[in-house]
Image (cartoon, grey):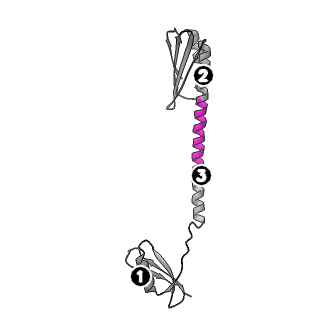
């Protein structure tokens, strides 16, 4: 992990530098390649530590103030660790949910193949095939019409052919 430590109104000593590097090991374990920027500053009687971590396209940031700079750094590390764990958990949950959604989508596809999706009820009237053709022509959105053939007394289906001009008639054999 690349760590850049800057002091404002404060000289960064070797002790502060070593302390920050030792504490950043807690953050480093979460990432293979990360950059950290630590800014330590003094305002009146308070010591302020700001830590920014850039890793995997995400930015984590914590700013705390305390009378002791070391305590402020500890608080920042705790905050950052919480943010990183929360982000990691959220990412894992999203990946798990997306894989579950895919699994459920596959199940739905298999279920759809095995069941009847739509049921329509309509009245079958006795008519001649010519009357059925005329009735089907009146309904441009309908592709077929089931009717009882007046001549044979059997159920027939008349349907539009792909050319859109001609019709086909389906009759039972026996």
Q: How far apart, in angstroms, are the residues tagged by discs 1 and 2?
A: 81 Å
Q: How packed is label 1: few (under 14 Cα within 10 Å), some, or many (20 or more)?
A: few
Q: How packed is label 3: few (under 14 Cα within 10 Å), some, or many (20 or more)?
A: few
Judge by depth and name the residue closer to the eye, 105 or 76: 76
Residue corresponding to mark 1: 134
* Residue at (44, 85) in percent of width and height: 131
Earlier sequence position, callout 2 versus callout 3:
2
**Residue 61 in the image, given as x and y percentages of width and height:** 53, 25
Element type at marker 2?
A: helix
* Residue at (62, 15) in percent of width and height: 71
Q: Nearer the viewer, mark 1 or mark 2?
A: 1
| Quadrant position of residue 80 | top right
Earlier sequence position, callout 1 versus callout 2:
2
Horizontal relation, residue 67 to residue 131: left or right:
right
Residue corresponding to mark 2: 77
Q: How packed is label 2: few (under 14 Cα within 10 Å), some, or many (20 or more)?
A: many
Q: How far apart, in angstroms, are the residues tagged by discs 1 and 3?
A: 48 Å
Q: Quadrant of the N terminus?
A: top right
Element type at marker 1?
A: helix
Q: How far apart, in angstroms, are the residues tagged by discs 2 and 3?
A: 39 Å
Q: Which mark is residue 147?
A: none
* Residue at (45, 74) in percent of width and height: 143
Q: Is 93 part of what is drawn in magenta?
A: yes
**Residue 164 in the image, given as x and y percentages of width and height:** 38, 74
Residue 164 appears in the figure: yes
Element type at marker 3?
A: helix
Q: Quadrant of the C terminus?
A: bottom right
Q: Is 14 part of what is drawn in magenta?
A: no
User: Could you tell me what secondary structure mostly forms the magenta stretch?
Assistant: helix
Residue corresponding to mark 3: 103
- Magenta span: 83-99
Judge by depth and name the residue closer to the eye, 162 or 142: 142
């Amino acid at each position: 992990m690349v760590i850049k430590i800057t002091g404002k109104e404060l000289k960064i000593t070797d002790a502060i530098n070593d302390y920050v590097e030792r504490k950043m090991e807690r953050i480093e374990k979460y990432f293979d390649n990360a950059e950290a920027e630590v800014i330590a500053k003094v305002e009146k009687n308070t010591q302020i530590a700001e830590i920014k971590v850039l890793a995997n396209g995400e930015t984590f940031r914590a700013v705390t103030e305390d009378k002791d700079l070391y305590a402020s750094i500890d608080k920042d590390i705790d905050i950052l660790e919480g943010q990183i764990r929360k982000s990691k958990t959220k990412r894992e949950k999203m990946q798990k949910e997306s894989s579950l959604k895919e699994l459920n989508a596959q199940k739905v596809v298999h279920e759809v193949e095995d069941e009847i999706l739509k049921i329509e009820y309509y009245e079958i009237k006795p008519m001649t095939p010519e009357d059925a053709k005329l009735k089907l022509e009146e309904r441009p959105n309908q592709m077929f019409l089931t009717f009882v053939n007046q001549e044979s007394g059997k159920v027939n289906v008349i349907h539009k052919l792909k050319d859109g001009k001609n019709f086909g008639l389906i009759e039972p054999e026996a």
